[in-house]
Amino acid sequence: MAVDEVSFEVQEGEIFGMVGPNGAGKTTTIECIGGLRRPDAGRILVLGLDPQAKGYALRERIGMQLQESALPDRIKVWEALDLYASFYRPSDDWRPLLEQLGLVDKYNASFAKLSGGEKQRLSIALALLGDPELVFLDELTTGLDPQARRAMWDLVRGIRDRGKTVFLTTHYMEEAERLCDRVAIIDRGRIIALDTPENLIQGLGVDSRVVFSVEGTFSLELLQTLNGVSRVEQSGERVTLYGQGEALVGQVINLLTERGIRFRDLRTERPTLDDVYLALTGREMRD
Amino acid sequence: MRGLGKLIWVKLKLFFREPEAFFFTLIFPVLMLFVFGSIYGNEPLDIFGGRGTVDMSVPAYMGIIIATTGLMSIPISVATDREKRVLRRLRTTPVRPHTIITAWLVMYFGITLVGALLLVAAGKLVYDMRFDGNVLYVFLAFTLGTLSFFALGFVVASLAPTGRTANIVGMVLFFPMIFFSGATIPWQTLSEGVQRVGRALPLTYVVQLLQGLWFGEPWSEHLLKVAVLLGMLIVGVVVSAKTFRWD
């Protein structure tokens, strides 16, 4: 079973993210919501419609970009848009989408000749045809370089800002944290947490980190005595201190200065969704 | 059937962007007619019951075209589109499955028909080909043969997991059929043993039905052929309807 008792609601006008490792059940969930797959049990309502009974009526009002779905190699960008636009009523004007997604100069290019990012942008353009109220974006940035990924984030925010609801899946925790208004963490087919990224990170009481390098030797035990420190690790010159509380950094710097310990490259790392995932599952998220 | 027109039009353009596909469907049969026409001419021959080589070849080569679209183009294209998730992408839109399948059928039937008409034009203009049949009857027989092979092609497309498998299965069916059915080599010149193999191949019935009606023979002489092809059509539709996967 890929998905087991997944329960959530998506609010209008938000970017809702479902995040979890590959094989956690994200695509299965999207396919059930879009009416492409029949769930064994349970109830789904999307825009007030049952995806199984009213799949076609539903797909008039939603846009879906599914992972790994593709177009024929030799179809041209404009032909794909023109074709897919004809599936909606009223047949949508697809030309503005070319502009919005930066595909104007790829108008006459074959699908096979597009870069990974361009293919994804075309795929989003197709998902935006028919002026959908709700847009599903499945593993949108997988395989894209960091720059293209950031551009894609701006694009997704733009979709939300035009009043649409976005449901996206990703296995990049950073992406979920930066992009989503609310995040559902899914693991082995179950939702193990659902909230805003901020609340998830704070609510779990996951430790912040203070990282710095020291010269010479000193006793780690000194640091252990500080308020709110849960553990300290050292590897070579590099010291990592885990703990909680606003005063943590200040205490560390005070202590080091008082004792005359020379340190450099001190920085704090606030916990991320990766840490939340680790805390919840006891496992690291892998890319 | 929203989107049908655009689906047909795009599919047609994609077909013409694959040189192998349109060469073997539209050009190759006409070239063959010119090659054998230039060797044998179209003089009446006893072995063909007083017909010429071109008279026999035009309806026979229609069998090659039908087998090419049915056993090669359809299985490869449909299985490849499924493998590459092109079909999955289509299914995320409100387009109805029957619209997609209708578009495929219309497009491939159109291509097959154009191939047949090119043969007729070449035979008529270059070799003064004889035709003693009823155009409507021949068209009906052509349609039956074409649809029954499309049905077989959809069975291959449904069962083949990848485009490559579909290609191989298609070829395994295609080559014996075009050589042992009288489609390329005239049936009358095949040995007894080869004819026995040929009688097990559905393309033989397409070729003989077309040739028979071409020369004005009544349907009543060809009921077995019609029954075989109708049977293949029905079984093919049922099997592919039960086994076809979009994903």
Image: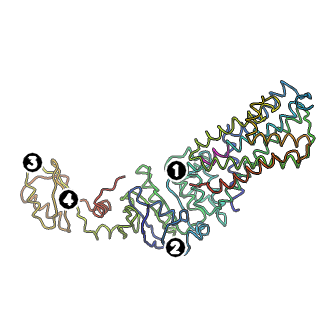
Of labels 3 and 4, earlier in sequence is 4
Which span of residues is magenta-colored?
B73-79
Q: Which residue is mark 2?
A: A45
Q: Does mark 1 fall on the same chain as mark 4?
A: yes
Of labels 3 and 1, earlier in sequence is 1
Front in this rendered view, residue A200 or A214 = A200
Q: Which residue is mark 4?
A: A210
Q: Chain of mark 1?
A: A
Q: Give the left or right position of residue A92, taking residue A67 as reference.
A: right
Q: Which residue is mark 3?
A: A216
Secondary structure under tag 2 reads: loop
Question: Is B77 inside the magenta-drawn segment?
Answer: yes
Q: CA distance from mark 1 to mark 2?
A: 33 Å
Q: Is residue B79 above or below residue A271?
A: above
Secondary structure under tag 1 reads: helix
Q: Is residue A217 above or below residue A10?
A: above
Q: Chain of mark 3?
A: A
Q: Does mark 1 fall on the same chain as mark 3?
A: yes
